[in-house]
Image: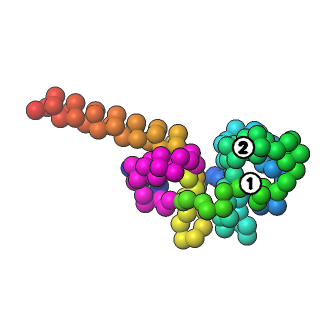
Amino acid sequence: MTVERILAAKGRDVVTTAPSKRVADAVATLARRRIGALVVVEDGDRIVGIVSERDIVRLIATKDADALEQPVSAIMTKSVVTCNEGETIDSVMARMTRGRFRHLPVVGEGRLRGIVSIGDVVKARIEQVEHEAEEMRAYIATA
């Protein structure tokens, strides 16, 4: 199974923000949309960073609440790891596990095409294993 199939099932919508937006605005968006990360973009779809709930928790833990007034660019992860639609869920899962991150933007032809979470990837992998097990049961039953 590939990232493309995950996106076909879940959709390609990505919630983004600008690097100049306040961290407080990012917090409000995360809470309102019930998501764990925002892709930070410029010029419509050029990825310049990603900001997650973890980034915000670390900010609040090390500074006071006034830190929420600084721009997202001050706390975002600038070297964003991405994937493409043709990658397998196994390779994406391994990359997310090694990097210890839960969100992976999907890029194609230099443009943002979607985002997958570790939950999306695990769900797809479970569905794949269940399908393989069903095929094996059917094969054994007809043998």
Q: Pinpoint residue 12: horizontal percent, then vertical percent.
A: 59, 53
Q: Pinpoint residue 82: horizontal percent, then vertical percent.
A: 54, 59
Q: Name the secondary structure under disc 1.
A: loop
Quarter of the rendering occupied by the C terminus = top left
Determine the image quadrant of residue 47. Answer: bottom right
Q: Which residues are magenta?
A: 83-103
Q: Pinpoint residue 115: horizontal percent, then vertical percent.
A: 58, 52
Residue at coordinates 89% horizontally, 45% vertically from top-left? 66
Q: Is residue 114 visible?
A: yes
Q: Residues within 10 Å of mark 2 (few under 14, many from 20)?
A: few
Q: Name the secondary structure under disc 2.
A: helix
Whether 120 is drawn above or below 80: the answer is: above
Whether 95 is drawn above or below 53: the answer is: below
Q: Are marks 1 and 2 in contact (CB under 8 Å)?
A: yes
User: Which residue is more in the foreground, 14 or 138?
Assistant: 14
Determine the image quadrant of residue 16. Answer: bottom right
Residue at coordinates 76% horizontally, 40% vertically from top-left? 61
The CA span between labels 1 and 2 is 9 Å
Q: Is residue 29 visible?
A: no
Asked whether, in this view, residue 7 is left or right of residue 32, the answer is: left
Asked whether, in this view, residue 105 is left or right of residue 140, the answer is: right
Assess whether residue 95 is covered by the magenta stretch.
Answer: yes
- Residue on which disc 1 sits: 75
Assess whether residue 36 is covered by the magenta stretch.
Answer: no
Residue type highlighted by circle 2: Arg
- Residue on which disc 2 sits: 58
- Disc number at residue 45? none
